[in-house]
Image: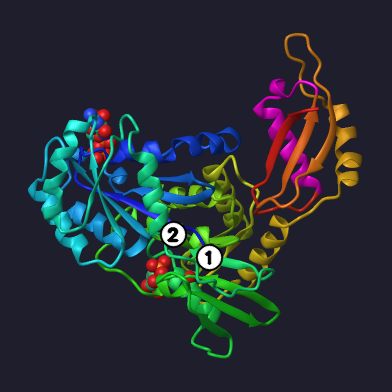
Amino acid sequence: MGNLVAIVGRPNVGKSTLFNRLTQSRQAIVNEQAGTTRDRQYGKCEWLGKEFSVVDTGGWVVNSDDVFEEEICKQVMLAIDEADVILFVVDIVNGITDLDLEVANILRRSKTPIIVVANKTDNNDLQYNAAEFYSLGLGDPFCISALSGSGTGDLLDLILSKFRKETGEILEDDIPRFAVVGRPNAGKSSIINAFIGEDRNIVTEIAGTTRDSIYTRYDKFGFNFYLVDTAGIRKKNKVTEDLEYYSVVRSIRSIENSDVCILMLDATRGIESQDLNIFSLVLRNQKGLVVVINKWDLVEEKSNKTMKTYEDAVRKRLAPFTDFPIIFASALTKQRIFKVLESAQEVYKARNTRIPTARLNEELLPLIEAYPPPSNKGKYIKIKYITQLPNTRVPSFVFFANLPQYVKEPYRRFLENKIRERWKLSGTPINIFIRQK
Ligand code: GDP
Ligand code: GDP
């Protein structure tokens, strides 16, 4: 079960510096293989073998000097709704401001564990200033310097200790977990209603370990799966849902707790940054993906050609990852609703594909011999052996080569495409590693 830590506070206290510090080491690892760009808002942190997500709620504001108080208060409320632990960052050099007091007022009403982080404690003398933060009424301030990193290790220990103990949600391991994600008004609630309706015979609510995480078990018409966080999607939060980042932060937990994400796009609107943000969250968490072009009933001129044009445009926009099913559906008329579930199940299978080593080598080595990696500085690169790693989240393949450092991205992509062509892996990310033989 994924844990989420939210960083809140007024501008310039050091939220983004702290975010970078917490996510840096881990991000470097992710970047090596996925080639994703870092963003300010969302990242992973690993400490003592435990991984959790971090969001910098301030990261969505482009120019943080002009933020309105109201905006900051909304960010804080969102954090209360979504996070397992909130880091309330204050500035030990400048002390408490009116805005700090306002944020503290909101935070005091929440039940979410809060740590007051007294940032910019660059030297020991400054620690004496921390006493004033007791007046925020949120417990002991914790002194750190996000810039130098001092105190951040102890802060991480404290964060881990605040995570709820897992009470063991009883889910069957081999039953897929699907999450419906997308921006507000894309049709998430509608499609969930179309799936499960109000029919009590189809669904069973299973109370989750964390407040809002509820898996709904679906078992009918040959489908057997869990839907993640249906209650959270159906329950709307009017305060925050108009914000650009709302749907993104709201999606994090659902995505992390799923195997396959059903990404809802609105056929009557183009793909915008919100859609792209959610899409990239799915990929960064290495989840399976089915894209639903919803509200297809509203598209007037429908032919195979319109679909093809639309589909091409979507794939182009979401490139370089383009190998996933796209379903044109209507949650309203229920057109192709079962097709969506069928695709999600296929993607789940693809994500769990195991290819025997013998078959990998038989099928790929001749191809590689015919199209070897281009030589580099006069050196020939030879790939000798391929195997799939056991027990990984997504299919991961290791190619053993004499000079792995010379195998460049285009060739890696070529290998990935060949694997995708031969084995049906639509909808699942895959990893390709080139290693020294
Ligand atoms: P945000 O607006 O809350 O995200 O704040 P930033 O992370 O952008 O930091 C605002 C300014 O404070 C930047 O100039 C940072 O370099 C500086 N800053 C952040 N953390 C520290 C720290 O621990 N010590 C000092 N001296 N400066 C810091
Ligand atoms: P959510 O915010 O993603 O949960 O979106 P909702 O399910 O609440 O849908 C937003 C609006 O779009 C509602 O007015 C729905 O009735 C409408 N809607 C959802 N799906 C469809 C569809 O397939 N066709 C049409 N015409 N309207 C839809």
Dot 2 corresponds to which residue?
A: 251
Q: Is residue 20 above or below residue 178?
A: above
Instruction: State the image quarter where residue 328 is shown.
Output: bottom right
Q: Earlier in the sequence, mark 1 or mark 2?
A: 1
Residue 179 is tagged as 1
Residue type of the residue flagged with mark 1: Ala
Classify 10 Å Cα crowding around label 1: few (below 14), some (14-19), many (20 and above): many
The reply, left or right, for residue 17 in relation to residue 434 is left
The reply, left or right, for residue 301 in relation to residue 15 is right
> In the rendered structure, which segment of residues is drawn in magenta?
402-422
For the point 64% across and 57% down, the residue is 325
Q: In the depicted view, which residue is nearer to us: 308 or 60?
A: 60
Instruction: State the image quarter where residue 125 is shown.
Output: top left
From the top left corner, tell me how far across and down residue 318 is, in percent: 54, 45
For the point 38% across and 52% down, the residue is 159
Residue type of the residue flagged with mark 2: Ser
Tag 1–tag 2 contact (CB < 8 Å): yes
Residue 437 is tagged as none
